């Protein structure tokens, strides 16, 4: 199987590629992820920025996360599809949306974060480790532990 991951927006005007497989994948139920995804959670993939490339115009919306770190969310200006985000606390990482993957079977989420904020109708796999808020040490520590 190829080690690269590819994704695109709904209209196909924006495509992205990661030259490496996901370092981590997680479901997030924080308010920002719920509202920006249009459903009960967002599933993020973590890849190194150095392995990530984008073709096409991307618009961004910046907003501080609960941690106070600025999160920059990229989306297609034509169809509105959410594509990826970055976090000022981890400038060497990028967080593509699993929903934008060309082959969604290429990732398997490993945890659920902010489960205390999940709507009752958005059920997750009970076998996944679940954290009421962010895991101890925040996302930076989780990524280090996953490597």
Image (cartoon, grey):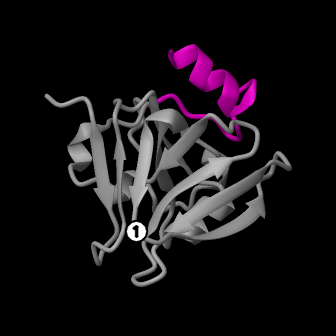
| Residue in front for this viewpoint, 29 or 71 | 71
**Mark 1 surroundings within 10 Å by alpha-carbon count, few (fewer than 14), some (14 through 19), many (20 or more):** few
In the picture as drawn, the residue positioned furthest to the bottom comes out as 78
**Viewer-side residue, 121 vs 42:** 42
Q: What is the x, y in percent for residue 74?
A: 55, 64
User: Taking 22 as reference, is 62 left or right?
Assistant: right
Residue 106 position in % (x across, y down): 25, 39
Q: Position of residue 27 (x, y in %)?
A: 49, 45
Compared with residue 132, is residue 141 higher up or lower down, i.e. above or below? above
- State yes or no: residue 92 in magenta: no
Q: Position of residue 22 (x, y in %)?
A: 39, 32
Label 1 SS: loop
Report the residue that reaches farthest toward the right. 68
**Residue 133 colored in magenta in the image:** yes
Residue drawn at 48 percent across, 68 percent down: 39
Q: Residue at x 58, y 25 (%)?
A: 143
The stretch of residues the image draws in magenta is: 128-147
Q: Is residue 94 above or below residue 82?
A: above
35 left or right, relative to 43 = right
Q: Residue at x 57, y 54 (%)?
A: 85
Q: Which residue is mark 1?
A: 56
118 left or right of 137?
A: left
Q: Is residue 56 visible?
A: yes
> In this rendering, does residue 48 appear at all?
no
Place residue 102 in its image quadrant: bottom left
Is 115 on the left or on the right of 100, as rendered?
A: right
The residue closer to the viewer here, 57 or 134, is 57
Residue at horizontal 45%, vertical 59%?
A: 122
């Amino acid at each position: 199987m190829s080690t690269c991951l590819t994704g695109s927006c709904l209209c196909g005007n924006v495509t992205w590629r990661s030259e490496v497989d996901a370092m981590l994948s997680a479901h997030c139920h924080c308010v920002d992820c719920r509202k920006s995804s249009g459903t009960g959670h967002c599933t993020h993939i973590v890849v190194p920025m150095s392995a990530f490339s984008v073709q096409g115009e991307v618009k961004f919306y910046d907003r501080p996360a609960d941690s106070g770190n600025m999160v920059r969310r990229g989306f297609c200006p034509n169809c509105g599809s959410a594509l990826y985000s970055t976090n000022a606390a981890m400038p060497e990482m990028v967080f593509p949306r699993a929903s934008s993957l060309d082959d969604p079977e290429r990732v398997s989420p490993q945890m659920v974060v902010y489960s205390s904020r999940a709507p009752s109708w958005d059920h997750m796999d009970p076998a996944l480790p679940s954290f009421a808020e962010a895991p101890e040490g925040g996302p930076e520590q989780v990524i280090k532990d996953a490597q």
